[in-house]
Amino acid sequence: MAVIAVVSDAYWDDPFWGTNHHIPLNLAKEHSVIFIERAPTWISPLRYDVPWSRLFKNLGLKELNEKLSVYTPRPRLPFDRRYRLVSRVNQKGLARELNRLFDELEIADPHVISFDHKAATLFDELRTRGQKCYYVADEVSEFNWPLASKKAIIEDEIETIRSADAIIATSEPLMEKCLKYNRRVHLLPHGVDLALFGRTTEMPEDVREIKKPIIGFVGKIGDWVDVHLVAGTARLLPEASFVLIGPVGTDVEALRSEPNVHLLGPRARQVVPAYLKSFACGIIPYKPCRFIHNVNPLKMYEYLAAGIPVVSAPMPAVAWKDELGVFIARTPKEFAGRISSLLSSDTSEKRAARLRFAERNSWEKKAKELSEFLGVGA
């Protein structure tokens, strides 16, 4: 059994889980895993939804079970996405903390997987001969971080890619980017939590009275979501209801003006499958941009695991799959036409094919593939 430290860019108790939660959780089925939470900066409570208590309380190591622990590091200096010197100082500080932690636990040569694009200094400073892997899940230079420098983000990531022993990329465009600086790159698309989405659930109360069929979206409603595309599609399908679940981070007045569009706000991840199973079709209405071009949408896997068909805006990671009911569309007219076609032609055979696809892409299988690529024995 290997020891693997996963340096996340999130907190363990985040309401929305992503790859940097599911991968360590499933690695811990065969290995001893320490989940390193994101270190807040001294101004995080002023700029983000971070409580002041995170800066002072519950620091250090907490054991969740015999194979999985969470480590909360001390706060760091702000502006580490703007000034590379600050980034290096912060990473040196984290390396000192982790080296001390590994010494105290008598862990020899742990493997380290980082989801942080600023990990080059961390990799250099850690006293371990284990594998040091950078896990690339998004095009980080396209995030709209406040007080950040795009130039600094790009340069930090390139340095991290070069210094890593191995790279995991979740989409082909991300893989191609990394191959320019490191030849040991493995393509590993996202997976799905079969145990969560396989539960038998009742329809949530807040959708029972909404007119069926329901066309749904689950995820953060940010600048990359084409709200005008959704509103236009909803106008063309007045007999259907459009339900969007997730926090709103952009102007959604175009959606509020449509009577058959329902913005329900965020929901806990444990109840998301119940909402998905009330949908007749899932949509991925993203705007064309570099961030979306490089993304591998986790929600596609979750829609399919819930047994529902998908209509998505075009992106390299989403391919037309008639046997699964995955269609590509660009305009409101195309979205409306694809949705209507899927609703009228869906079959039990296609629903079964979606579930088989989900089983082939479980997070457990993704974690095993990652272990094999890194040469980490059970």
Image (cartoon, rainbow, N blue to C red):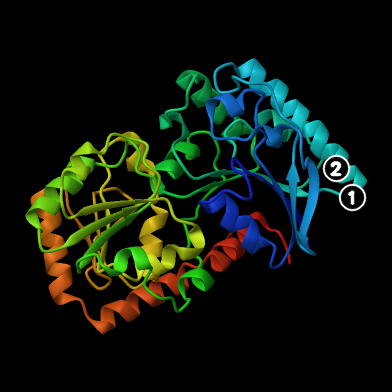
Q: On the rendered image, what quadrant is the C terminus found in? A: bottom right
Q: Amino acid at mark 2?
A: Leu
Q: Is residue 167 left or right of residue 290?
A: right
- Number of dots carrying numbers: 2
Q: Position of residue 99 (x, y in %)?
A: 84, 38
Q: Residues within 10 Å of mark 2 (few under 14, many from 20)?
A: some
Q: Is residue 177 left or right of residue 39?
A: left
Tell me whether the residue at label 2 lies in contact with that at label 1, contact meaning CB atoms closer than 8 angstroms.
Answer: yes
| Residue at 70 percent of width and 36 percent of height | 53
Label 2 residue SS: helix
Question: Can residue 131 be seen?
Answer: no
Q: Which residue position holds label 2?
A: 101
Label 1 residue SS: loop
Q: Is residue 325 above or below residue 371?
A: below
Q: Residues within 10 Å of mark 1 (few under 14, many from 20)?
A: few
Q: Position of residue 330 (x, y in %)?
A: 16, 48
| Residue at 50 percent of width and 21 percent of height | 148
Q: Is residue 112 left or right of residue 22?
A: right
Q: On the rendered image, what quadrant is the N terminus found in? A: bottom right
Q: Position of residue 26 (x, y in %)?
A: 63, 63
Find the residue positioned furthest to the bottom.
348
Q: Nearer the viewer, residue 311 or 242?
A: 242
| Residue at 46 percent of width and 70 percent of height | 197
Q: Is residue 6 above or below residue 341?
A: above
Q: Is residue 299 above or below residue 224?
A: below
Q: Amino acid at mark 1?
A: Leu
Q: Position of residue 8 (x, y in %)?
A: 63, 43
Res. 105 mark? 1
Q: Nearer the viewer, residue 271 or 22?
A: 271
